[in-house]
Amino acid sequence: MTRRELFEQRQKRRSILIAATSTLLVLVAVVVFIPMTPGWEKVQKSFFNLAVLTKTLPKLIDAFQFNVMIFLWSAPLIAILGLLVALARDAKSPAMFPLRILGAAFTDVFRGVPVILTVYLIGFGIPGLGLPRPWNSPYIWGSVALILTYSAYVAEIFRAGIDSVHPSQRSAALSLGLSERQVMWDVILPQAVRNVVPSQMNMLIALQKDVSLLSFIGPVEIFRQAGVFKSLLANFTPYVGAAIIFLIVTVPATRYADYLLARQSKERS
Amino acid sequence: MAKLELRNVVKQFGDVTVCNGVNLDVEEGQMICLIGASGAGKSTLLRCINLLEHIEDGEIFLDGEDIAIPGLDPQAARKKIGMVFQNFNLFPHMTALENAMLAPRRVYRKSRLDLEGDVRSLFTRFGLADRMKNYPDQLSGGQQQRVAIIRALAMRPEVMLFDEITSALDPQLVGEVLDVLLQLKNQGMTMVLATHEMQFARQAADKICFLKDGKIIEEGTPDQIFGAPKHFATKEFLARALK
């Protein structure tokens, strides 16, 4: 082995050793010091109670299906509405001016209001009109509130994607005799959408979590179900169970989004 | 009547006048080379001819018809005028073949099947038959630029504009692209080039126009311009460019 290789091997061994030691120290601190706190036993009983967890988990998973359902029908509608708003905001012809104003107002309003407020206002307000079943369902109007809010964010991301396509692509496409609309659909949008896939993945993950906000207006989804168990059993463990279920879904999704982002930045460099 | 005529073309970006009253006649089948320092207005002039830039004043006649009349649909003229850019500007999400077929498919509503033979023969003619299914990032710069030329030719244009199409290429790849230009010239294509390739311009051009500050200040045959330039600015530029 050359001197350089020996040196590099020694360096590598050293950094592994340092990483292992520091991890061990942190673990020891957590395992030793947290149980020494005065409230630890109570916390353990009310938050990490295995008996409660095994008892409530199946029901929590059942309730989570509502989250998944609401997510599944909201996500495609958000993608469509978000894209339409983005296109409306980028429309150039003067006849489209009202549409542009409307698009700007839409994104301003729904990005400016806390999600929970929108859920309340739409989820309680519109069923209050006394519509017949099923049009008074909080599932529908709660979903609408999420769709509106998320479309505003998604639209802005699409717009950033459209801006990220170099203007020379537009010149080239126009020079071939394509119309503005054809340039947008065939040349700009396919590239724009591809550029923002990782960002939109993050929006999907956020949406999956925010479905829980609908619990405030009625639907018994996982967060609400956990609340019911909490009251019933006087124990907070169901919330931890709910958090675990969320993590099982969101962690792989987050990892995947990060992977896409890393791959994209590698492609660009 | 010339194929393409520019009369007093003026283009401004804000306070900056980039084209300051350009007059130019391009006869059918001619190859015109625009030379001059960077910023002299060559590229902008080409973009004006293709109506990618809106001109402030002047006329641009194609077959005697003014295509730059405000309010006129630019698409009609662009179908007849092809353009190739310095940085290729291929569509990265499409294969070379799809790049070439997109415009005729959309503009003339032709099917892939109808076009394929036509476009395939263009690829074959320019030595890229085995590259049709490749994406732009799988091709060398010279290959990409030839695909860009094929893409423009697939629209069957009557005039071709070339904006410094070899400037972004490695020196050893310049030749293959210039060969394509010679082929087109031999087939009688009407062409306007903005170029820094002085040797090529001298050998191949029918007419050379020297631009400075947005104006054509001297034009003539390659022999006149390179052999006996009249203007001091032309002499100065050529002395530097040919060094």
Image: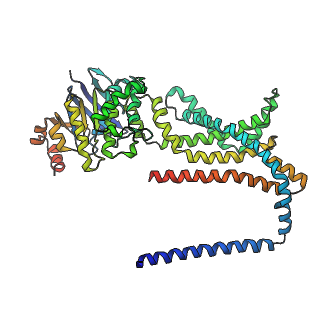
Q: Residue at x 42, y 36 (%)?
A: A170
- Residue A190: horizontal and vertical position, in percent? 50, 38
Q: Which quarter of the rendered picture does the C terminus of chain A lie within?
A: bottom left
The reply to whether residue B37 is in sight is no
Q: Residue furthest left?
A: B228
Horizontal side of residue B18 vs A219, given as left or right = left
- Residue B172: horizontal and vertical position, in percent? 25, 49
The residue closer to the viewer here, A115 or B14, is A115
Q: Which quarter of the rendered picture does the N terminus of chain A lie within?
A: bottom left
Q: Is residue B153 above or below residue B166?
A: above
Q: Is residue B3 above or below residue A22?
A: above
Residue A247 figure quarter: bottom right
Q: Is residue A228 above or below residue A19?
A: above
The residue closer to the viewer here, A203 or B102, is B102
- Residue B209: horizontal and vertical position, in percent? 19, 36
The residue closer to the viewer here, B78 or B88, is B88
Horizontal side of residue B127 vs A125, given as left or right = left
How many marks the image carries: the answer is: 0
The reply to whether residue A181 is in sight is yes
Residue A14 figure quarter: bottom right
Q: Residue at x 9, y 42 (%)?
A: B227
Horizontal side of residue B214 vs A27, given as left or right = left
Residue B136 figure quarter: top left
- Residue B115: horizontal and vertical position, in percent? 37, 26
How is the structure coloured here? rainbow
